[in-house]
Amino acid sequence: MSDNRNRSAGARGVCSVDAGGLVTAPIRGQRRRGAPSLVLPGDPDGCGWFAIGGGEYVPFPSPPTGHPARERRTVRYVGRPTRWGNPYRVVKGRSGLLGVITPTGQVVNLRTDCTGSEAARVAVRGFQHHLDHLDRSKPRAVLARHLAPLVTADVLSCWCPLDAPCHADTLCDLVGRLRSGVLVPGLVATPGACGGALRVDGTEWAVAEIASNVSSWLDAGMCRNDMVLQTAATYSLDPDLVRLAARVGGAL
């Protein structure tokens, strides 16, 4: 177990870093039962992380007894049954044949010599298709709304072994792109502003705050265009950025 875990550190546990050296993407962790309840790439054998509540994890065993890290980590679980779980599941039939169950309940049988790792890759590709389908109505906004609660996490966790394909790797990459402003130009997330939450680039205005303001004007009966212009004046923002933030924040 430890050998596989450490080998995966170079392949899957490396955070993406921007030109200024800022870590922009969370890493994937493996959720486990017992202690430690979370393992990250590069953790020594027998070491890991332990949940203390509120999504916070601390090193296990407590430093300085062998663990290289001493800080807390904020972790979000993205497996089933959360909204971020992969709706494509790998199953094994009575004959031992592997298959993948789609969100509609259809079983796609794989070739007889398909390995578990290959089947997992098929499920991950299905998940990527699922995310693409989320964003067809308003480009990027729907997907960004789906990912926004994850931007404050240091780690996205699932039950998959660290050396196996996992949908959480896709989520880590997308959250990194959202934080850095690549996924939705004009919106970013950095640890030193707005508590790490998604915000309008170049400002201290969180997307959630702008969306809340827009919602309040909607509740007051103001038409959408006037509401956007009023909010833009309040925050000294371009109306197009207000519309974008409101869509991502769920107000429009």
Image (cartoon, rainbow, N blue to C red):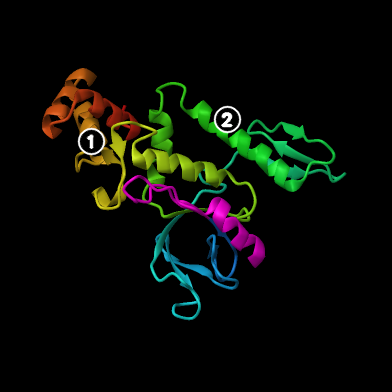
In the rendered image, the residue lying farthest to the bottom is 65
Give the answer, above or below, for where 226 lies relative to 153: above
In the rendered image, the residue lying farthest to the right is 95
Left or right: 126 as drawn, with respect to 230: right
Left or right: 18 as drawn, with respect to 89: left
Q: Which of 173 and 77 lies nearest the eye of the viewer?
A: 173
Please state, as top left, top right, bottom left or bottom right, where the C terminus lies in the image. Answer: top left
Left or right: 116 as drawn, with respect to 126: right
Badge 2 crowding class, 10 Å Cα cut-off, few under 14, some 14 to 19, many 20 or more, is few
The image position of residue 34, as x and y in percent, is 59, 69
Residue at 24% across, 48% down: 194
Q: Which of 187 and 34 lies nearest the eye of the viewer?
A: 187
Badge 1 crowding class, 10 Å Cα cut-off, few under 14, some 14 to 19, many 20 or more, is many
**Circle 1 SS class:** helix
Left or right: 6 as drawn, with respect to 58: right
**Residue 240 is a magenta residue:** no
Disc on the earlier residue, 1 or 2: 2
**Which residues make up the magenta segment?**
1-28
What amino acid type is highlighted by mark number 1? Ile
Q: Which residue is mark 2?
A: 129
Residue at 61% across, 61% down: 5
